[in-house]
């Protein structure tokens, strides 16, 4: 007998029909296997927005404590409805709110973090043979105040509950049936990835972001909770995200991610002296602007160029700050480029296989795609390219690494 | 400085506009007088029904525990919204749910009764100078489960909180401006009653039922909480309901209530032996049918007639049961009459003034209204009459006792 945590999002819980005919059936099917089942639910699609709009029609800057007090009711309704449906179908169930389930958080209203989970009550109901339905997205402070975890927080609730209960598996049910080798809207013959490691999932964030809150993957990695992404509306195994094992390195490239949401800033002719780079990035950090890739080349005649990327939203602020620092340090100038994209290939197998980078560069060159920046980690190669080549780059890399084939049938470079 | 509890019903909380421009203003006006203010709110009009309909679209017989879990969210939303509005207007406030406010109830889901209130948290916030907004209609069991108190339960919540806090006053804000000497739809010159006793209010239930949950008046009487019924949408003092004092007996008739919602059942020619009446009323009690008036006349030749009234809803069931008992005890038969009405005059002054009953009978006779049954208490005279005379009876009694005049200007019979 296993203990399984299932999480259903707002689309899955979107109507009474879906709750009764889709979600409850998935829960019952797991229970019928003889497993203990804990279910974590989001609010019905649209409900959280309805509540936020009610609040915003009073003031654009509401008291955040009371905001959470109001918005947290969405999950209470959906959890109660699912429990009612399960009981009605003959499967004893009980609904618990965040505070009833013992989910303790800090006091950062609207974006609280889970501190601990007291699982006594959950276990008590499981021991009675009940299915336990818990509201996602929320918790309670030490002082008994209701908090919410921020958008997508139900994934984190589910993983945290799975970790606290030492669950055998955490199934994230959603409206897609898994994580793919590339965005299927760009690459029609992208394949569902059957198994991948937490590290690969984090690097493939832009593929998973539509499916999973990234914080929940970090949480799952930290507590070694196997995550399965699967569809509420279909019957299949989805994608399993788990700890790396020896079989995983056999696949060189697991998937291809792309991101059009960054801008590049270049500081030209920077005097190559110790502490210069720090001046730029300290200034950005002070302004709370996260920097993604940083590239600095060897210097010529005591000068160098430094390039980095930031989120497009932050680009104009970052440009302003960088220009100020550039003047102070005597650089020639600052160039900003918003028309870029990042394409990344990800796979644990790169560690043990040479020639992957060469093949990436060769493939892009063959199609006339110029590489503007390169950044690599042990399991990832990211290239910044001109934004207009994004889809082409994803497609030709997908083909070059044979990602349209079953993992076992791919050539080893 | 006083401590005032204010209660606002669903109509008062019916829209963001009303919450911000009516309710919040009433709260602030009380706070500005230097008082400590605790506010108890119902769900926004229509919201509780919306939630019940969601549940009922799954099953007509939902698990009641989960039903309460869902339905209780209506007040959480409205309480949060009012607190947000107050904070936004510059008056520090905090919203508390039933469980946060320490409202302990029994486990009778959907119709729970309040057992105790731990006021620590409420007092803590009051001491910080905050307005405390509490969800009506709900509480928590010893085991941490959410309960609701049944329709109209927010009145009871407000009175119970006022009692537990030893509040100076509990103001029930609603869409009428007080309790009237008669239903103003029948008697256009009915007057608002400025002050009356709990006992009078309970006897005038049919006047107050549209305004106050009767259980809340019993609660207020038990704990001696002065209640004031007043309008959210007007500026006046409303009606004060409080403990009897020596000035109250000066008014002979406080008001006239009527009730068309009863039916009369008569058992004819009942053998007048001990225990016969018990047989009838035990059978009705076993079937959970409440009996209102009971009249039995002196017997003639060892036989008597017994009449009683029940709610119209229960009439056909009561008739069936009574017929069965009538056969067993050898009575002649059972007659049922649904076309009756009860008209009652109520006033503490009746105790010390003779001639009130005579004046009632004389007035009704003068207009050809036949009295079918009479029942009296110390402070009430009720007559059962033919239903078609209801409005006429109320009007002529209102006139006879000069209830259209100020209390001080009325003749003493």
Image: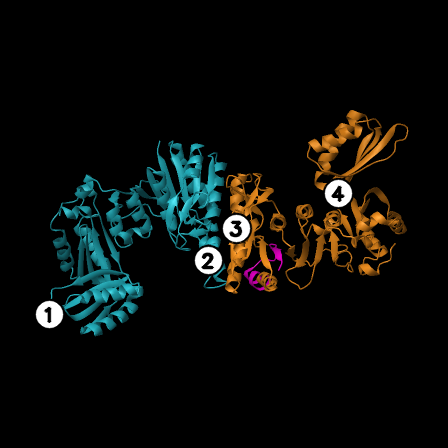
Chain colours: A cyan, B orange
The chain that hosts pointer 3 is: B
Q: x, y percentage for residue B304?
A: 86, 31
Measure the alpha-carbon separation of dots 1 and 4.
102 Å
Q: Who comes first in sequence, dot 2 or dot 1? A: 2
Same chain, labels 2 and 4: no
- Of tags 1 and 3, the one toward the viewer is 3
- Labelled pair 1, 3 in contact (Cβ < 8 Å): no
Residue at which label 1 appears: A302
Q: x, y percentage for residue A155?
A: 36, 47
Mark carried by residue B121: 3
Same chain, labels 1 and 3: no
Q: How many marks?
A: 4
- The answer to whether residue B14 is magenta is yes
Is disc 4 surrounded by few (<14), some (14 to 19) or many (20+) residues within 10 Å? many
Q: Quadrant of the C terminus of chain B?
A: bottom right
The magenta span reads B1-22
Mark carried by residue A52: 2
- Labelled pair 2, 3 in contact (Cβ < 8 Å): no
Residue at which label 4 appears: B262
Measure the alpha-carbon separation of dots 4 and 3.
45 Å
Is disc 1 surrounded by few (<14), some (14 to 19) or many (20+) residues within 10 Å? few
Measure the alpha-carbon separation of dots 2 and 1.
55 Å
Same chain, labels 1 and 4: no
- Is residue B406 visible in this depiction of the protein? yes
Q: Is residue B396 left or right of residue A263?
A: right
Q: x, y percentage for residue B28?
A: 58, 63
């Amino acid at each position: 007998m296993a203990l399984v945590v299932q999480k259903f999002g707002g689309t899955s819980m979107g109507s009474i029909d879906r709750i009764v005919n889709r979600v409850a059936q998935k829960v019952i099917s797991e229970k019928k296997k003889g497993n203990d089942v804990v279910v974590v639910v989001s609010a019905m699609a649209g409900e959280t927005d309805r509540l936020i709009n009610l609040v915003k029609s009073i003031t654009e800057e509401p008291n955040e404590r009371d905001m959470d007090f109001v918005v947290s009711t969405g999950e209470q309704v959906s959890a109660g409805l699912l429990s009612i449906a399960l009981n009605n179908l003959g499967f004893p169930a009980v609904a618990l709110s965040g505070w009833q389930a013992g989910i303790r958080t800090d006091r950062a209203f609207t974006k609280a973090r889970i501190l601990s989970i007291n699982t006594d009550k959950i276990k008590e109901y499981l021991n009675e043979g009940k299915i336990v339905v818990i509201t996602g997205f929320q918790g309670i402070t030490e002082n008994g105040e209701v908090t919410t975890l921020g958008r997508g927080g139900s994934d984190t609730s589910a993983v945290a509950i799975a970790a606290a209960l030492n669950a055998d598996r955490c199934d994230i049910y959603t409206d897609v049936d898994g994580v793919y080798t590339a965005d299927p809207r760009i690459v029609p013959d992208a394949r569902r990835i059957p198994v991948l490691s937490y590290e690969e999932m984090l690097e493939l964030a832009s593929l998973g972001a539509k499916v999973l809150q990234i914080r929940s993957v970090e949480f799952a990695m930290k507590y070694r909770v196997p995550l399965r992404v699967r569809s509420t509306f279909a019957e299949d195994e989805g994608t399993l995200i788990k700890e790396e094992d020896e079989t995983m390195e056999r696949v060189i490239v697991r998937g291809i991610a792309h991101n059009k949401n960054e801008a590049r800033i270049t500081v030209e002719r920077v005097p190559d002296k110790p502490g210069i780079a720090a001046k730029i990035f300290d200034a950005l950090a002070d302004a709370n602007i996260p920097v993604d890739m940083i590239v600095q080349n060897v210097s010529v005649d005591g000068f160098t160029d430094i390039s980095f990327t930031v989120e497009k939203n932050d680009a104009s602020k970052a440009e302003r700050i960088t220009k100020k620092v550039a003047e102070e340090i005597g650089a020639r100038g600052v160039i900003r480029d918003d028309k870029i994209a990042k394409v990344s290939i990800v796979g644990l197998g790169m560690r043990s296989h040479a020639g992957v980078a060469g093949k990436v560069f060769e493939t892009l060159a063959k199609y006339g795609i110029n590489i503007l920046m390169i950044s690599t980690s042990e399991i990832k190669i990211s290239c910044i390219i001109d934004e207009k080549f994004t889809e082409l780059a994803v497609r030709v890399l997908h083909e070059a690494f044979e990602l349209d084939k079953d993992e076992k049938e791919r050539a080893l470079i």
